[in-house]
Amino acid sequence: MSATSEPRTPYYLIDRSKLLDNMRKIDIVRERSGAKSLLALKCFATWSVFDLMREHMDGTTSSSLNEVRLGRQRFGGETHAYSVAWADHEIDEAVSHADKIIFNSIQQLERFCGNASGIVRGLRLNPGVSSSSFDLADPARPFSRLGEWDAVRIMPLMDRISGFMIHNNCENSDFALFDAMLSQIEERFGELLKRAEWVSLGGGIHFTGDDYPIDDFCERLKRFSDTFGVQVYLEPGEASITKSTTLEVTVLDTLFNGKHLAVVDSSIEAHMLDLLIYRESARIAPNEGAHE
């Protein structure tokens, strides 16, 4: 392939200028609110653009051992390690790569507290509220395995942890909903938060989207931080890369079976699995024809 020829489809195309637009919005939030920003590697782990992103973010957060390793080796900055459950053969290596490790349950904290004695430790909280309308993606759904919810059981453990992770937003572009849920978190876990040094509010907050009230968002984050005396972390995944990346495909065939159809050289399962899981349709560009 020559230097000027198009690569063969299918491939993902990242527009660095659009990615930079998102990074600049993240900069605004960091500067005005005091919150730190960690790239959620479970959402985006394409290290070819980490050189750009690390200039605007404070590090990474992960959900598996390999992501922890990737964050430390390829991105740098702060490296937060979280997993729904760490295995015995994983924990020591995870600790070796991480600055902070966040346990999903009291049982995991008690089991591995000694292994993680040399780094900062935290616990995931489940506030029982979320922005998700899709059960599969709802961390607060009935019988959820994600995080601890009983403040009474958590309080005696505060000598073993210094902070919390709370992830209850999912593609949430509604600031009023974010504000209301954060108020519920303050009321439910206020006594715990007063004893914490840091709190991660997770990802799923669509604050880089068009027309998002970023000034109100920054003020709310700062008020939360000042009220409880904590360092706030955000974990933007999709918010980091929104509208910057496309799947480039070629139409191989067209046919008509009650509607006009195009067959392309990619598959939902291999290239855009989220669309299948969440039963969504792909957005197409250019989309200027008579049919969709």
Image (cartoon, rainbow, N blue to C red):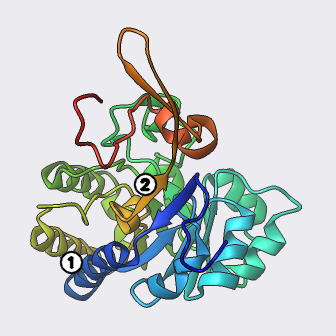
* SS type, badge 2: loop
172 on left or right of 103: left
Which residue is at the far top?
258
**Residue nearer the viewer, 226 or 180:** 180
Which residue is the site of mark 2?
Answer: 167
Q: Secondary structure at mark 1?
A: helix
For the point 16% across and 61% down, the residue is 210
- Left or right: where 108 falls relative to 260: right
Residue kind at label 2, given as amino acid type: His
Residue 48 seen in the figure: yes
Q: Position of residue 230 (x, y in %)?
A: 35, 79
Q: Say whether disc 1 or disc 2 marks the residue closer to the N-terminus.
A: 2
Q: Position of residue 119 (x, y in %)?
A: 67, 82
Residue 74, image quadrant: bottom right
In which image quadrant can residue 35 be found?
bottom left
Q: Residues within 10 Å of mark 2 (few under 14, many from 20)?
A: many
Q: Nearer the viewer, residue 268 or 36?
A: 268
For the C terminus, which image quadrant? top left
What residue do we see at 25% from left, 77% from top? 25
Q: Amino acid at mark 1?
A: Lys
Instruction: Write the residue at 75% across / 57% down.
Output: 86
Q: Which mark is on residue 222?
A: 1
Nearer the observer, 230 or 176: 176
Q: Is residue 226 above or below residue 180?
A: below
Query: Which part of the image, by quadrant, shows the N terminus?
Result: bottom right
Q: CA distance from mark 1 to mark 2?
A: 18 Å
Local crowd at mark 1 within 10 Å, few (<14), some, or many (≥20)? many
Nearest to the observer: residue 117 or residue 272: 272
